[in-house]
Amino acid sequence: MLQADKAADPVLARLQKLHPKLIDLGLERTVGLAQAVGSPHQNLPPVIHVAGTNGKGSVTAFIRAFAEAAGLRVHVYNSPHLCEFRERIRLAGSLVSTSELIALLERCETANNGAPITFFEITTVAALLGFAEVHADLLILETGLGGLHDSTNIIADTACSIITPIARDHEHFLGTDLRDIAAQKAGIMRPDRPTIWAKQTAEVAAVLTDTATAMNSQIFRGGDDFSWQVNSDKSWHFTWNEARYTLPAPALRGAHQYDNAALALMGLLASGLLTKTTAHSALPGAALASWPGRIQNLTGGRLSAINGGAPLWLDGAHNRHGADALCSTLDELSADYDSAGIGWQIIYGALNTRPPEPFLAALSPHIKAVFCVTIEGEDAAIPAEILASKAQNIGCEARACTSLTDALLHCDKKRPVLICGSLYLAGNVLRENETFPD
């Protein structure tokens, strides 16, 4: 079990002060620094690049699980982290060590020489430096925000691109027009390289198709060019052309995880990293994928003990599209607890980067009571009192609580509890529960 390690905090803190903005989309600074440290973006293993609004992390988790089950060495780049920065960088299967991380960051800091650069930009270059210097068969690269102007997009070529469902999110950076958002996500496609898409709205699919056609990219549409069917025992069949595979139930909970696992498997097949023959060795990976903070059952730890052993779940869903997927999962979990119709107790915290009402409204049919908390350590956290007022305005029984512990103490121990609303809240939960990601 990973323990929180603070040794890299001083250099991370210095890097956060190099630019007045947290996010300033564009590639010029990232390219300039990458060139200054030897152009690691030009010396990478085959890359599967993943963009989209929701499900990116789950898709990367399934790609990794399938590839490692097939014996491949895999790099992974994810963001944000939950408890500790080094969760973002996995070198050939293992989280980057603290000493390796500090060395990579300091090399980039020295080369940057105090020039303005965002935290994500300089840390992305540090990650690419590590990926270029450690042997692997595959790099799974998750975009941070958007795609076209995201720092991960400085790579010249990919084995394939994967685009998860696209919806409105981060509107203060990407705008409110779905076509514009889709054009940003489509920016990770590369000429003459396959691109794999989740099921999209007609509006989004039209934009993606235009981009793919202009680049001569072969398109694999989920549900059309490849498909999957779930069996009564939760195993499932994946079909592509004449190939048909039977897989175990996904390790990640929720009906939408079959969609994510199918995207992952198609990406490995379309890229040629798995063949129709070698794919059989990868199939057990469906049951091995791990992605903390996403429909995670907290069965041990301090918070679980406070909850008295009652069902306690954690999820990082934070927007309306994520709430819709979460609702279907709550239906499944309610059946497990024979609590359908009783309702869930929700411990909820959120940032001011998006309005909380659409998220809560989507969940409201499942909610018995909402216990609102202010996310500790986040300047953008919405105060618990405001969240409770907004929840009450849409008809939820809600109260403001002073902490996660306070919220759990107010919960009925006979009903299941779900903590949700932000990945930053999920990170706080795992830290307080002392169950760190590994």
Image (cartoon, rainbow, N blue to C red):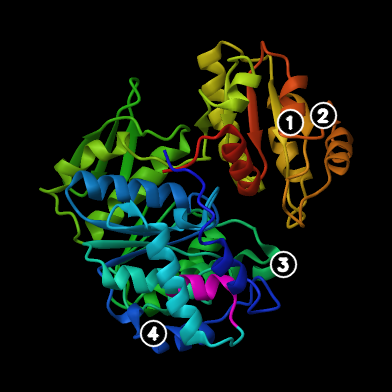
Q: Earlier in the sequence, mark 2 or mark 1?
A: 1
Q: Residue at x 65, y 48 (%)?
A: 319
Rate crowding at label 1 as few (under 14), some (14 to 19) or many (20 or more) other CA atoms within 10 Å.
Answer: many
Q: Which residue is located at x 41 percent, y 38 percent?
A: 1
Residue 277 sits above or below residue 237 on the image: below
Query: What's the amino acid at mark 3?
Result: His
Residue topped by disc 3: 172
Mark 3 Cα within 10 Å, few/some/many (few <14, many 20+)?
few
Spatial CA distance of label 4 from label 3 is 32 Å
In the drawing, what numbered circle is on residue 364?
1
Q: Which mark is residue 396?
A: 2
Q: Which residue is mark 4?
A: 37
Question: Marks 1/4: CA distance?
Answer: 50 Å
Amino acid residing under circle 4: Val
Disc nearer the start of the sequence (1/4): 4
Question: What kind of residue is marked 2?
Answer: Cys
